[in-house]
Image (cartoon, helix red, strand yellow):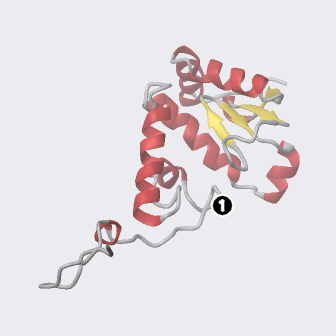
């Protein structure tokens, strides 16, 4: 069954192939033992992924969306998840492919630093739609609370002998 893609979807499919992210996604799916098939809007859907990393209901590499479960069941349980993951495929294109991975890691670290949660302040997750991906937004914590603790003014900390 052939699907008609928009110009943008064709551009994304070709761009993510040329920038190496889709071939990497196919390799990750294969190494993880997933079955890959066609999906909507130029995506490839991989189900039955058996490696424990990353810990996620689904994750995207290029135009390949990978899950440990079954896509039909996942679509019934979380109908907005594929829309969220498709946004990540656009992010791979915009970031030039594989540079997305260290940029995402930096965004993940920033989110953890600010909220104690990997997604809440991750620019990529926010732009893909936190709620669409099933994420809750955690409150932002002050960066001051993360620094070294100071004793009250005028008092010196005394270390035990």
Q: Residues within 10 Å of mark 1 (few under 14, many from 20)?
A: few
Image quadrant holding the N terminus, namely top right
The residue under the point 16% across, 84% down is: 155
Quadrant of residue 38 within the rendered picture: top right
- On the rendered structure, is 143 left or right of 19? left
Q: Nearer the viewer, residue 87 or 112?
A: 112
Image quadrant holding the C terminus, namely bottom left
Q: Residue furthest left?
A: 154
Dot 1 lies on which element?
loop
The residue at which mark 1 appears reads as: 134
Q: Nearer the viewer, residue 65 or 52?
A: 52
> Quick check: 20 above or below 144?
above
> Quick check: 45 above or below 138?
above
Q: Nearer the viewer, residue 99 or 14?
A: 99
Residue 110 in the image: x percent, y percent?
40, 53
- On the rendered structure, is 137 left or right of 161? right
The residue under the point 39% across, 71% down is: 141
Residue 98 in the image: x percent, y percent?
50, 25
> Quick check: 5 above or below 152?
above
Count of numbered tags: 1
Residue 131 in the image: x percent, y percent?
60, 62
The residue under the point 44% across, 28% down is: 99
- On the rendered structure, is 155 left or right of 7? left
């Amino acid at each position: 069954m052939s699907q008609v893609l928009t110009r943008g979807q064709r551009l994304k499919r070709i761009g993510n192939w040329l920038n190496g992210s889709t071939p990497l996604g196919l390799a990750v799916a294969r190494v993880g033992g997933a079955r890959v098939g066609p999906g909507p809007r130029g995506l490839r859907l991989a189900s039955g992924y058996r490696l424990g990393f990353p810990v996620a209901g689904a994750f995207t590499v290029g135009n390949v969306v990978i899950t440990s479960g079954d896509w039909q069941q996942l679509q019934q349980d979380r109908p907005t998840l594929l829309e969220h993951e498709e946004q990540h495929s656009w992010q791979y294109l915009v970031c030039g492919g594989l540079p997305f991975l260290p940029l995402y890691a930096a965004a993940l670290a920033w989110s953890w630093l600010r909220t104690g949660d990997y997604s809440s302040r991750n620019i990529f997750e926010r732009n893909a739609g936190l709620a669409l991906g099933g994420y809750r937004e955690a409150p932002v914590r002050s960066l001051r609370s993360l620094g070294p603790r100071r004793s009250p003014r005028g008092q010196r900390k005394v270390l035990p002998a």
